[in-house]
Amino acid sequence: MNGKGVVTTLDSILKWITRLAALNLLWIGYSLIGLLVGGVFPATVAALGLSRKWINGENEVKSWMTFKQIYRQEFKVANLIGWILTLVGLVLYLNYRLIAASEGEIMIIIPFAFYLLLFFYSLIVIWVFPLLAHYQAHWFQHIKNAIIIGLTKLHYTFYCGLLIFTVAYYSLGYPGLIPFFSISVISVGMMWICMRIFWQLDEKMSE
């Protein structure tokens, strides 16, 4: 690689580092604007939506304006889906505590049913927000599509889950990453994986 190529590569790396840090700070800022309770979920969709534009080659978009637009546009639906999933997650956690406290006094089918529900819940959590960032549809349709895509593209679901786990693991080990890179790396990585599926679906729908 010649000197010009090295400079170009370094410039590209620095641009992405700056983008990721800015995206992470935007997510934190807009989550706080919504007092966390109403801000985390639309901020997450906005982070995924901005990541989607970068992955699609829209490199000249204004990050703050784009983030703000998506945040406002998806505020209601993102919170609706997010809080439904939060409440379901709470119910699943309480059921887990009951199963763990039963000390083998329940039928084996109950833990089996619980872990099956947990599996479907995980599919929805992984896929529903990227779907919301890419497609316009009713919120319940997003949930159904999340299950369908999650089941039919299990290897991609695994990649997304592995990405989230890996970033969370290193973020807990190096907390200094959290304010600048943790959420943004997950957002860009998730959309990079998910767009491989969405491009295929879009191509089929256009035929």
Image: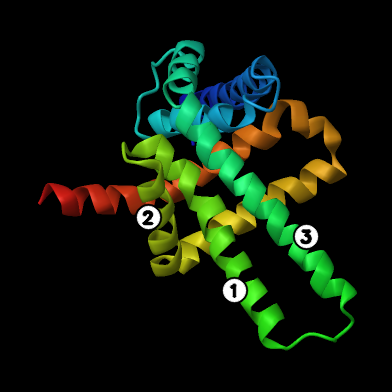
Q: Quadrant of residue 92?
A: bottom right
Q: Amino acid at mark 2?
A: Asn
Numbered circle sitting on residue 116: 1
- Is 31 above or below relative to 168? above
Is the C-beta separation of discs 2 and 1 under 8 Å? no
Q: On the picture, is 102 further left or further right than 119?
A: right
Mark 1 or 3: in front is 3
Q: Which residue is mark 2?
A: 145
In primary-sequence order, the first of circles 2 and 3 is: 3
- Quarter-wise, where is residue 197 in the image? bottom left
Residue at (69%, 80%) from the top-left corner? 110
Name the amino acid type tagged 3: Leu
**Mark 2 vs mark 1: which is more N-terminal?**
1
Where residue 131 appears, as percent x and y from the top left, is 41, 44
> Pointer 3: what residue?
94
Whichever of callouts 1 and 3 sits on the residue coming sooner in the sequence is 3
Give me the residue at 39% from left, 29% from top. 53
**Tag 1: Cα neighbours inside 10 Å, few (<14), some, or many (≥20)?**
few
Q: Secondary structure at mark 3?
A: helix
